Amino acid sequence: MSSELYHVGATTLCPHAGNASTISSNTRVKVSGMAVATLSDVTMVAGCTFTLAAGPTPQPCVKVQWLTPATRVKVMGNPVLLKTSTGLCLSAAQIPQGPPNVVAAQIRAKGT
């Protein structure tokens, strides 16, 4: 099933409403004037305020590890990410915190 291509300007939130932003190494393919994100790119989270109840120990999300990229579309040999790609937000201690939520992405280019 096809979905919109994920790009560096897409609005993505961690499960605790922290903002995620992608840093892409892709310099060739752009959608809506922004680089298409690939599986090898880094997605960092800022502004997550998650704290464990027992403690209280801060465990904010700091990065997203993407798990399911597109199967047919690649940029510079790397599979691209889709709006529907699944991922996992991780704390600094690599503790899984939940899936990211892609709120908004470009709507013109799609892939599978």
Image (spheres, rainbow, N blue to C red):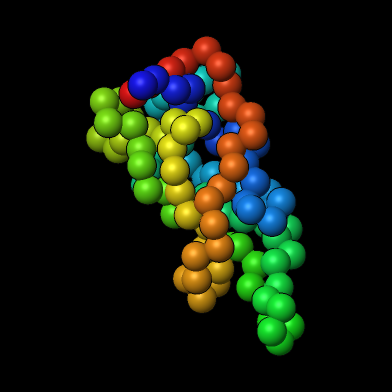
Between residue 78 and residue 58, name the one nearer to us.
Answer: 58
The image shows residue 108, relative to residue 40, as above or below, that is above
Tell me the residue at 36%/42% (across/down): 68
Tell me the residue at 68%/76% (across/down): 52
The image shows residue 101, relative to residue 84, as above or below, that is below
Residue 80 in picture, x, y percent from top left? 37, 33
Indicate the quadrant containing the N terminus: top left, top right, bottom left or bottom right: top left
Total marks in image = 0
Tell me the residue at 55%/63% (across/down): 97
Tell me the residue at 30%/25% (across/down): 73
Q: Is residue 52 visible?
A: yes
Q: Residue furthest top?
A: 108
Indicate the quadrant containing the C terminus: top left, top right, bottom left or bottom right: top left
Quadrant of residue 92 within the rendered picture? bottom right
Residue 43 in picture, x, y percent from top left? 52, 50
In the shown orientation, is residue 46 left or right of residue 98?
Answer: right
In the shown orientation, is residue 78 left or right of residue 95?
Answer: left
Q: Is residue 26 visible?
A: no
Residue 30 in picture, x, y percent from top left? 48, 23
Residue 83 in picture, x, y percent from top left? 50, 31
In the shown orientation, is residue 48 left or right of residue 33?
Answer: right
Between residue 99 and residue 9, name the one nearer to us.
Answer: 99
Between residue 38 and residue 52, name the one nearer to us.
Answer: 52
